[in-house]
Image (cartoon, rainbow, N blue to C red):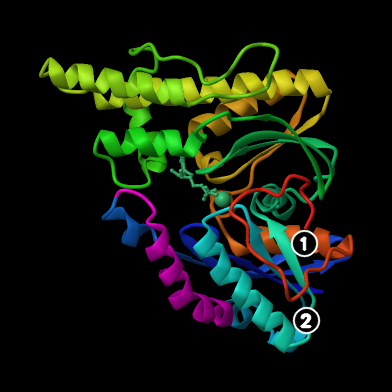
């Protein structure tokens, strides 16, 4: 069976074809049209511009995905589309396009939760992966820990109470003059600095919770930068990048370790755009090694937003018989019960 996956929740328009055969998922094409260059001028994603750019890209990249997979629309067994959470205007472009395509061609339509899709990217790269496992999802809009009981049954056991890890990286990256999005640039710059040079608060909250808070860390870093500016001192960018990264990495690793001990799970999946962070990947690898836990992190191409992860998540919803109808709507927030 071929699943066409469509993603447009933020600043990437993507379409992909994934083949499901004997329970195995294989990527046949995964076309991503990134809008990063367009939004860079503004230092962040401008929702209205994002929606327009999705409209311009969506037809072409869908055609490319089908051609790349060597199939035509009549071979597609399901169209899977990210319906939530995300920027509402951006989501609506993908949802309406997928709805039209599915109903005009009599193809079943499946609505996908973007966060579950990030986790589903792991099935595409770790063939032996099977629930139950813990999933640490770190992205531009989310930072959460899930106990994954089966591919569509997730329990959120920890979450940020304010900003997401990716937002925190991007904000400080912007303030110290790195190009948008700051996460990848900070990752590199952190190698040049001293991770213990600047004392910053941890985003990991107390021992009785698996929650995070990144706003205090962000404010402390901004105060440090303001202090340097007031004193007419040059901001030690590399030391700040290293210390800030260390605070985020240590905080996420601490809660991941606590969650592993609390649940006794023996597999950990790291997913979402910030899973591309090399420091975080290494730290979690050593946490997992210390506890005899196996770890699955998708390759960089599957960490950021992409259609293949949506197709993978859509396959599991399809298997569960969760189909969407013509009244499918997009939603900016996660629906409370995780069901479509
Ligand atoms: O998952 P994603 O593509 O979009 C959302 O669903 O939010 O994540 C984008 C985020 C951005 O904040 C970006 O700065 C961050 O992922 N990111 C990184 C790295 N690469 C991307 N953050 C830290 N280190 C990286 N290497
Ligand atoms: Zn994402």
Residue 144 seen? yes
Q: Give percent across and percent down for residue 88.
A: 54, 59
In the picture shown, does residue 17 fall above or below 250?
below
Dividing the picture into quarters, in which one does residue 326 lie? bottom right
Q: Which residues are magenta?
A: 43-64
Residue 30 seen? no
Front in this rendered view, residue 180 or 84:
84
Residue at 67% across / 25% down in the picture? Answer: 256
Foreground mark, 1 or 2? 2
In the picture shown, does residue 255 fall above or below 168?
above
Circle 1 SS class: strand
Dominant secondary structure, magenta: helix
Residue reaching furthest to the front? 327
Q: Give percent across and percent down for residue 247.
A: 47, 20
In the picture shown, does residue 334 fall above or below 219?
below
Is 54 contained in the magenta span? Answer: yes
Q: Give percent across and percent down for residue 328.
A: 71, 68
Q: CA distance from mark 1 to mark 2?
A: 19 Å
| Number of the label disc, if any, that sits on residue 107 | 2
Circle 2 SS class: loop
Q: Give percent across and percent down for residue 77.
A: 80, 77
Check disc 1 and report the residue beneath it.
25
Q: Residues within 10 Å of mark 2 (few under 14, many from 20)?
A: some
């Amino acid at each position: 069976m071929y699943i066409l996956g469509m993603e447009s929740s933020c600043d990437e328009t993507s379409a992909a074809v994934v083949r499901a055969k004997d329970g195995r998922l294989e990527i046949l094409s995964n076309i991503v049209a990134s809008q990063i260059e367009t939004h860079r001028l503004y230092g962040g994603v401008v929702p209205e511009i994002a929606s327009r750019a999705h409209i311009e890209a969506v037809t072409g990249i869908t055609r490319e995905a089908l051609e790349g997979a060597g199939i035509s629309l009549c071979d597609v067994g399901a169209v899977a589309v990210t319906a939530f959470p995300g920027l509402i205007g951006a989501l609506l472009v993908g949802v309406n396009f997928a709805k039209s395509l599915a109903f005009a061609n009599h193809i079943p339509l499946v609505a996908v939760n973007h966060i579950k899709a990030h986790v589903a990217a792991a099935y595409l790269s770790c063939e032996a992966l099977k629930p139950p496992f813990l999933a640490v999802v770190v992205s531009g809009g989310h930072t959460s820990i899930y106990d994954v009981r089966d591919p569509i049954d997730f329990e959120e056991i920890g979450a940020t109470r304010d900003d997401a890890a990716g937002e925190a990286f991007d904000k400080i990256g912007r303030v110290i003059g790195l190009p948008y999005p700051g996460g990848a640039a900070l990752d590199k710059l952190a190698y040049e600095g001293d991770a213990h040079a600047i004392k910053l608060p941890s985003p990991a909250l107390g021992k009785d919770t698996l929650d995070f808070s990144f706003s205090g860390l962000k404010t402390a870093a901004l105060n440090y930068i303001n202090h340097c500016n007031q004193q007419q001192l040059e901001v030690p960018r590399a030391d700040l990048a290293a210390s800030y990264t260390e605070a985020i990495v240590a905080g996420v690793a601490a809660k991941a370790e606590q969650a592993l001990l609390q649940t006794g799970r023996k597999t950990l999946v790291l997913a979402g755009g910030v899973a591309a962070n090399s420091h975080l990947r290494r730290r979690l690898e050593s946490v997992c090694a210390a506890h005899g836990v196996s770890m699955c992190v998708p390759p960089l191409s599957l960490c950021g937003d992409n259609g293949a992860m949506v197709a993978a998540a859509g396959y599991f919803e399809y298997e569960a018989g969760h189909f969407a109808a013509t009244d499918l709507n997009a939603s900016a927030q996660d629906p409370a019960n995780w069901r479509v």
